[in-house]
Image: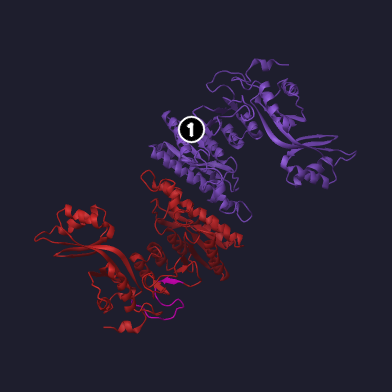
Chain colours: A purple, B red
């Protein structure tokens, strides 16, 4: 059975127009001879009557009286309603479709409500249905625990549902429909010449997602990667092929292109840099500082520990709380608010000489000060002033020629330094 | 475990006020040392976002594109949402409560979607939960088929859910909360002195429901009757005890009162009487007429067959269609539109002499013409002109002294004729 999974988010199934666009994508897949498992989210955004947030508002939002078990029962209705509405639309247009809850589709989870883990996929019934129907519409984001409780899969839930179904059903690929044209080389609101990537690796997209690209949840990528199921990040509003996410950046038609260096430039805006200098002989500093942050529930990032003290960042809105906590334990931090973390992401970065030099040169040519830096085998981060952020993202996007169609495969980049 | 079931309909759980009234009834039961299984309907009436009708409107109402299976999936969400919202309210007020779907509560049904039959109740998990919680709120109207499909129980569904749980859990009784004070001796909009009955038998209430009293679905009564679980029809808006439905009309405190004759007077307004006279030697008439009605999907009632022809009634809005059908097969019927069927209901009627005489006398004293009559062992029906209906219901209500507290137990009635 030739089979693909297509996932449509809340905005895609929110109204008649979106649902009809989604239907067209399904029709094209059917014309190409595929059976389709369509995974849908709840209809709409906050304020729409069947959106997750609105359902939660019925119980006064999330508070201590609501058990997570009941919260899951309530939220799961959003996707079930959506699956029936969408399946009905398909049938109205002559497509043989049926709707399945997460439980019916085979999602067996643990009982960790609101953030359940998939333990097993039991897809016999779904496969049976695919013999009878051309499309099975599955309520995303949900499963069932051993004891019959309805569970939800937590953040990025419907992406995770789609990837898990792709893996379990051995789908040729999984389409993730969004409102963008794919994974972009940079945020198009900041970089005019940003363009969608044809292909990225599972690892690259995870790094980009963690850095704020937010097109797909890393957990979904993880599942697809383990099962070696390709993902496509595509726009609901066009027929563009979008970005293929797979295990190597060899072209989607198998053409033999070189591994590229840099995939994209991402950023996290509005962070605050905090420095705490060590007093002579005060070796408790590091544990004091990070215990204080942990105690206050403040996430720390960009940590740089040295004998002279510690430097790290917190998100802008945590600044006051962090400073107060440090003062309470007797430290007076040096604080630099309004910074931004800019990331150069690329699976090809590891071990390639000259990448850091290229970054430093590009930024200093623009007069941008690097406040701090760090690197992993797939990403190099720099901390800059918030006011320099847009300029920095553009400078790096240019430096790595990301606006060119074959960006990163250009010999010129490889030969530098 | 001392246990009762309490069922709250859509209007009871529709808004905060209704839910708080429902909560007070539960609190009283808890104060009396009972554990409570609360069965809830979907929130509200047509137009409320989570009411059954509104959910159905998402798929353009019930039409040929919607399979009944998907319709059930959609509708079941209404009660699930309601169960979580109500359970949450109870917890906010310090009551230990949890919410169950129909499937979780143990409703195992066949796959006859939108009208599923309960095959088995598997209540282990519910009983387990009642050890831990004081209240389990169960989504009414729904169950699950063997294959994991969500089913609904059809008309009167939540009443049926409550009765089935009462039977399976061996509850002391089942409270059915409505917006009336109980089962009335007659429609209070027509009969000023109508009063709620203290106690009626399962059989009596079934006859009254079929005759238009509509306080509880006969199917729910059937289930309660078989399991010998008493029902109480009560008002959400008061602490009045309502009407006890049980197997004998012996008083609720076991006092030894006599079986009563008549329970109540009900009516069906706006029916049309149709007479078709037999032509000489035309023996096909009866089958001709009723086959024509069946072919047109017209329900017939009050059928009176004789060698001279047939007489029967149809509902007022079917008059034209029925007459047209008869003319097509060559009959010219005599039609009496604007009639009403008035019923005298009472388990005690069977075999008691003088009841018919009492009815005829009461009506003729008021100058009301009886167009037709019929009787079963629990009910006597008369057909009158629509314009005489109110007068007839009042005359019969008076004749059987139904406005008196111990109506029907009055020796005077028994000794007549």
Q: Quadrant of residue B225?
A: bottom left
Looking at the picture, how far across and down is residue A326, in whole percent? Answer: 81, 44
Q: Is residue B145 visible?
A: no
Nearest the viewer among B32 and A81 is A81
Q: Position of residue B168 (x, y in %)?
A: 46, 62
| Residue B258 part of the magenta segment | yes
Location of residue B128 (image quadrant): bottom right
Badge 1: how crowded within 10 Å, few (<14), some, or many (20+)? many
Secondary structure character of the magenta stretch overall: loop
Residue under pointer 1: A4
Helix, strand or loop at label 1? It is: strand
Quarter of the picture holding the N terminus of chain B: bottom right
Q: Residue furthest right?
A: A280
Residue A284 in the image: above or below residue B131: above
Image mark count: 1
Residue at the spot 43% in from the left edge and 49% down from the top edge:
B56
Q: In the rendered view of the protein, which quadrant contains the C terminus of chain B?
A: bottom left
Is residue A47 in view from this perspective?
Answer: yes
In depth, the one of B227 and A10 nearer the eye is A10
The image shows residue A169, relative to residue B239, as above or below, that is above
| Residue B167 location (% of width, % of height) | 45, 64
Q: Residue furthest left?
A: B280
> Range of the magenta residues?
B242-261
- Residues A71 and A283: in front is A71
Q: Please give the chain letter of the residue carrying mark 1.
A: A
In the rendered view, tell whether residue A69 sits above or below residue B392: above
- Residue A10 at x, y percent in the picture: 53, 40
Does residue B269 appear left or right of residue A241 in this picture?
left
Residue most extreme to the front: B387
> Does B87 appear in magenta?
no
């Amino acid at each position: 059975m030739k089979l693909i999974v297509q996932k449509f988010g809340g905005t895609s199934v929110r109204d008649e127009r979106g649902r009809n666009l989604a239907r067209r994508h399904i029709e094209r897949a059917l014309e190409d001879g595929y059976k389709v498992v369509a995974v849908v989210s709840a209809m709409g955004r906050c304020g729409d009557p069947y959106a997750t947030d609105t359902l939660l508002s019925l119980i006064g939002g999330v508070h201590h009286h609501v058990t997570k078990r009941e919260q899951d029962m309530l939220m799961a209705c959003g996707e079930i309603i959506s699956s029936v509405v969408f399946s009905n639309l398909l049938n109205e247009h002559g497509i043989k479709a049926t709707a399945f809850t997460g439980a019916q589709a085979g999602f067996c989870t643990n009982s960790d409500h609101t953030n359940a883990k998939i333990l097993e996929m039991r897809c016999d019934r779904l496969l049976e249905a695919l013999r009878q129907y051309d499309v099975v519409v599955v309520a995303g984001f949900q499963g069932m625990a051993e004891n019959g409780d309805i569970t939800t899969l937590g953040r990025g839930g419907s992406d995770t549902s789609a990837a898990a179904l792709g893996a379990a059903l051995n789908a040729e690929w999984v389409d993730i429909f969004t409102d963008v044209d794919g994974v972009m080389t940079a945020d198009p609101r900041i970089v005019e010449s940003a363009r969608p990537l044809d292909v990225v690796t599972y690892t690259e997209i995870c790094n980009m997602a963690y850095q704020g690209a937010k097109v797909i949840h890393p957990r979904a990528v993880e599942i697809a990667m383990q099962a070696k199921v390709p993902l496509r990040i595509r726009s609901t509003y066009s027929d563009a092929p979008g970005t293929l996410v797979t295990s190597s950046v060899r072209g989607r038609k198998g053409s033999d292109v070189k591994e590229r260096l840099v995939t994209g430039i991402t950023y996290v805006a509005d962070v605050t840099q905090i420095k705490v200098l060590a007093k002579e002989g005060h070796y408790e500093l590091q544990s004091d500082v990070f215990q204080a942050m942990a105690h206050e529930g403040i996430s720390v990032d960009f940590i740089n520990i040295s004998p002279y003290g510690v430097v790290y960042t917190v998100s802008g809105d945590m600044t006051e709380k962090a400073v107060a906590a440090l003062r309470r334990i007797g430290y007076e931090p040096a604080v630099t608010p309004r910074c931004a973390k800019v990331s150069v992401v690329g699976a090809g970065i590891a071990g390639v000489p000259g990448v850091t030099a290229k970054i430093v040169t590009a930024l200093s040519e623009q007069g941008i000060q690097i406040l701090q830096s760090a690197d992993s085998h797939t990403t190099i981060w720099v901390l800059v002033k918030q006011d320099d952020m847009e300029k920095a993202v553009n400078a790096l996007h240019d430096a790595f020629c990301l606006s060119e169609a074959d960006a990163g495969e250009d010999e010129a980049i490889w030969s530098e330094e």
